[in-house]
Amino acid sequence: MVGGGIAGLTAAYMLSLEGLRVAVVEAMRVIMDVTGFTTGKLTTQHGQVYGLISERYGLDKAQLYADANQAALARIISIIEDNSIDCDFQRTDSWLFTEESAGLETIHGEVELALKLGLPASYSETTPMPFTKGAMRFEGQAQFHPRKYLMFLADQVVARGGSVLENTRALDIAEKEPGAVLKTSHGDITAGSVIIATNTPFYQSSLYAPRFSPTRSYVLGVKLEQQVPEGMHYCIDDHAASIRNQPLPGTDERLLMVGCWDKSLDISETEAQYEKVEAYARERLPLASVDYHWFTQDQKTPDRIPWIGRVKDSRHIYVATGFGGWGMTTSGVAGMLLTDMIAGRDTPYAALYDPSRAIQQ
């Protein structure tokens, strides 16, 4: 397994449950890059992705995407509850909102489509955020602390005979029947299968990297002068604001994480982007203090469906990438799909996520 983020550790854990011995190879420290800076939303509400998939591929493909993520959400929650993992897990609603009257038609369309797909959607004129014009509400979603959750999975991989190799850079992969050899900065690892679960795959990078659309989110952790609103929130407007609360350890207080970005600025203009986020938050909420700031970068595929599965013309090399900012449930999809493929089981989702799509995009 190349990559010690949520996709790599989730797949490693699920494969270890199959009785396989798994080695996780991470160039830095596990759960310290993209996954370490996520806002930790466990939801099948992925912005406007259902409409985009339905328009491009039809309702059947949108249904597969919905079913896959619903199954992943249920699996992740089951892992947390069955193992009593202390990871700030909380059931909550997810809201897709607009601040503009012109956006209400889009919201209504997303609600109508979500209901066709059997998703827990409804329309609401009001949300816990007082500045919205209208929103789609997904009930029964959840939030958690991904690092606390994933440290448990990493420990379980090791407890089942696997390894977590930090500060070990993957350099190349050579297929060698009946498996493959992963060449690393600390030596070669021979395996039956190799999964590349990184933000941008290092193997065959020329196939994937030019087709990605990178997206950054700049996030502030703020305290409010009033009670922090409940729920997870995502805006369809240009600034693509993302908001949710997080308990502060050892206190009864909650932090509010507010993220967005200004497309008129270059993504490298970090300080200016943070200023935009703070201005957005101060215009809408009674801020008491700004305590934290960070950013993260995600990769979108051209059709907004991640690439998960066997690498083209390979028998033993797999990839999981292009999660488009929705890596929490998508990591569950990747873990289940790749485990089924490696175990030789049929999966209804393989064609939808097939990485060979990258060649046509």
Image (cartoon, rainbow, N blue to C red):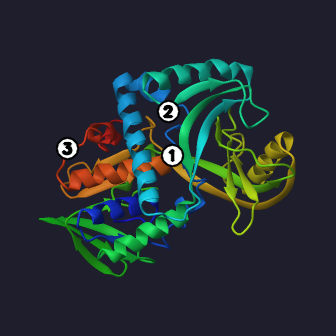
Q: Residue at x 44, y 56 (%)?
A: 200
Q: Which residue is mark 2?
A: 49
Helix, strand or loop at label 3? It is loop
Q: Nearer the viewer, mark 3 or mark 1?
A: 3
Q: Residue at x 47, y 45 (%)?
A: 212
Helix, strand or loop at label 1? It is loop
Query: How many C-alpha atoms fall within 10 Å of the one at disc 1: few (<14), some, or many (≥20)?
Result: many
- Three-letter amino acid code at the position of disc 3: Asp
Helix, strand or loop at label 2? It is helix
As rendered, which of 46 and 313 lies closer to the eye?
46
Q: Residue furthest left?
A: 177
Q: Nearer the viewer, mark 3 or mark 2?
A: 3
Residue 277 screen position, x and y as percent:
76, 48
Please indicate, yes or no, whether residue 33 appears anywhere in the rendered image: no
Which label was assigned to residue 301? none
Q: How much space separates mark 3 and mark 1, taking CA atoms?
A: 25 Å
Q: Which residue is mark 3?
A: 346
Answer left or right for 219 relative to 298.
right
Which label was assigned to residue 326? 1
| Disc with the residue nearer the chain's start (3 vs 1) | 1
Q: Quadrant of the N terminus?
A: bottom left
Answer left or right for 53 relative to 122.
left
Q: Quadrant of the C terminus?
A: top left
Q: Quadrant of residue 282?
A: top right
